[in-house]
Amino acid sequence: MSIFKDLREEHGDIKQSLKKIIESEGRNDDYEVFSQKLIAHLQGEEKYFYPEIQGVGMTDQAETARKEHQNARQVLMRLQGMNGLEADWQDNLFRLQEILVEHISNEEKEIFSQAEAQLSSGRINDITESYLNLKAAMIGT
Ligand SMILES: [Fe+2]
């Protein structure tokens, strides 16, 4: 079990889903599924992954990642209050995409490899299990 594989797969899914939503009109079921998955992903990383990397000295990286999540959340909150017909619906989607693409690249190019080198395999297994349990409880997959 490795959290890194799951997180990378989810990142790919998040980017692809958001692209599809941007290309479609307004707010539809795809958006609802996407936002639920994204919220579960953000929460899981914040609860189980960032404290662990902080524990092995990656404090700055955890701090930056949390700030990026906060930025994504702010845009998500704006989107949640919209019906998809507003003039700035699309702009907010683009802003979210910009934040997420940068954040994902930061995690995949820097954080994951460092964390993988620092954390023991037992720890990685525990984090993965906790993360997947939370996700299952939140979105049922
Ligand atoms: Fe993240």
Image (spheres, helix red, strand yellow):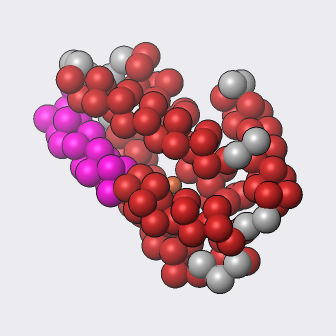
Residue closest to the far left: 87
Percent x, y for residue 7? 57, 44
- Image-based side of 41 in relation to 89, left or right: right
User: Mainly helix, strand or loop, the magenta region?
Assistant: helix
Residue at position x 27%, y 40% from top? 93
Q: Quadrant of residue 87?
A: top left
At horizontal 75% and vertical 47% (from top left) the residue drawn is 128
Q: Residue at x 85, y 57 (%)?
A: 122
Between residue 109 and residue 76, name the one nearer to us: 109
Q: Is residue 41 magenta?
A: no
The x and y percentages for residue 50 are: 64, 66
Quadrant of the drawing holding the C terminus = top right
Marker count (numbered): 0
Residue 132: where, in percent of width, then height?
A: 74, 39
Which residue is depicted at the point 67% across and 47% down? 3
* Quarter where residue 20 is shown: top left
Task: Please state if 58 lies on the left or on the right of 83 as rendered.
Answer: right
140 shown above or below 48: above
Q: Is residue 64 visible?
A: yes
Residue range in magenta is: 84-102
Residue 130 vertical placement versus 59 (above, below): above
Q: Is residue 119 above or below residue 83?
A: below
Query: Is residue 121 rendered to the left or right of residue 84?
Result: right
Q: Position of residue 121 (x, y in %)?
A: 79, 58
Say whether residue 92 is visible: no
Residue 100 shown in magenta = yes
Quarter occupied by the N terminus: top right
* Front position in the image: 32 or 130: 130
